[in-house]
Image (tube, helix red, strand yellow):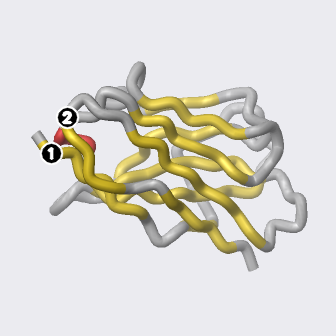
Amino acid sequence: QVVVHESGGGLVQTGDSLRLSCELSGHHSSPYQMAWFRQPPGKEREFVAAINWIGTSTIYADSVKGRFTISRDGAKVSMALQMDNLEPEDTAVYYCAAHLTFAQTPTSGPYDYWGQGTQVTVAS
């Protein structure tokens, strides 16, 4: 049973930075592509960023390019999302997700395992 756990959310001001972390447990050393999604208040969940199983390739939503950085330490099943120059529009519940694959290029879906989410609130 794979369990996904996020941490690092909080309340910040416009222009501040915040770092989210995600870890998998129960993974049995399998190759997991990992990603971040977010769900703003009153809106549907949207893709934010993804990284391949070994940390050599990343993709981003246009809305966060140049401000957010996804990273992981090789094939380890923990990763981070560094969020800089935050805007009120980044306010959302952020979810970590994982998908079992050796693919070199990450994608925005589908994902098999999801965390419970962590709240990020950016005050104007």
Tell me the number on the disc at residue 96: none
Front residue (pair 110, 96): 96
**Are discs 1 and 2 less than 8 Å apart at CB?**
yes
Q: Residues within 10 Å of mark 2 (few under 14, many from 20)?
A: some
Helix or strand or loop: what does disc 1 sit on?
strand
Q: How far is the residue under mark 1 from the one under mark 2?
A: 6 Å
- Alpha-carbon neighbours of circle 1 within 10 Å: few (<14), some, or many (≥20)? some
State the image coordinates of residue 51 (x, y, percent, origin top left).
64, 38
Q: Quadrant of residue 17?
A: top left
**Tag 1 residue:** 123
* The C terminus, quarter of image: top left
- Residue at image mark 2: 14
Q: Amino acid at mark 2?
A: Thr
Residue in the image at 49% along x and 36% along y: 82
Q: How many numbered circles does the render carry?
A: 2
Residue 3, above or below 43? below
Measured as percent of width and height from the top left, residue 116 is found at 47, 72
Asked whether, in this view, residue 36 is left or right of residue 72, the answer is left
**Residue at 53 percent of width and 68 percent of height:** 115
Decide which of 121, 114 is in the foreground and name it. Answer: 121
Q: Residue at x 22, y 35 (%)?
A: 87
Look at label 1 and name its amino acid.
Ala
Query: In the rendered structure, which disc, 1 or 2, sits on the residue that comes first in sequence?
Result: 2
Left or right of residue 104: residue 48: left
| Residue shown at 26% from the left, 42% from the top | 90
Relative to 1, say whether 84 is above or below: above
Identity of the residue furthest to the left in this view: 124
